[in-house]
Amino acid sequence: MNARSALGKYGESLAARRLTEAGMTVLERNWRCGRTGEIDIVARDGEVLVLCEVKTRRTGAFEHPMAAVTPEKAERLRRLAACWIHAQGGAPPGGVRIDLVGVVLPRRGAPVVEHARGVA
């Protein structure tokens, strides 16, 4: 594992912990759908299925992680949502939401974890 993937895995672990603390149930991590891509975290928030993109950056990185969902990325996340729903045999009763968790790792101190609901 290289340093970049280790950073991403660490950020995903912090994000999963944040979602669990917020009352969500993490169902899967790093779920893949062929060539469409990967969903970092699949969770349930009550009756709502939540597909969560996680972006982790070190302090001083070029772009804040919360700015990482471009229109193209949002469309890919919607395609991944459809792939998940198809693989599971249908949509959950509460529908589907796409969230973003941004993790910033400062040089010193605790990581900053931000959760934005319904980004795409």
Image (cartoon, rainbow, N blue to C red):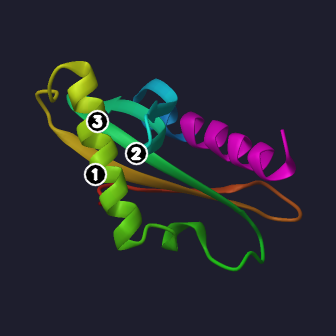
Amino acid found under the numbered disc labelled 1: Arg
Q: Secondary structure at mark 2?
A: loop
Quadrant of res 109 = bottom right
Residue at x-position 70% and y-position 40%: 9
Q: Which mark is residue 78?
A: 1
Which mark is on residue 36?
2
**Sequence-earlier tag: 3 or 2:** 2
- For the magenta stretch, what is the residue range? 1-17
Q: Quadrant of the C terminus?
A: bottom left
As shown in the figure, which amino acid type bears the numbered disc 3? Answer: Cys
In this picture, is 109 found above or below 38?
below
**Residue 51 in sight:** yes
- Say what secondary structure mark 3 lies in: helix
Q: Which residue is mark 3?
A: 83
Residue shown at the point (44%, 67%) measured from the top left? 69
Callout 3 environment at 10 Å: few (<14), some (14 to 19), or many (20+)? some
Task: Check contact, mark 1 vs mark 3: CB within 8 A.
Answer: no
Query: Dot 1: within a 10 Å radius of its alpha carbon, few (fewer than 14), some, or many (20 or more) residues?
Result: some
Q: Residue at coordinates 40% horizontally, 45% vertically from top-left?
A: 36
Of the numbered discs 1 and 3, the one sitting upstream in the chain is: 1
What's under tag 2, amino acid-wise?
Thr
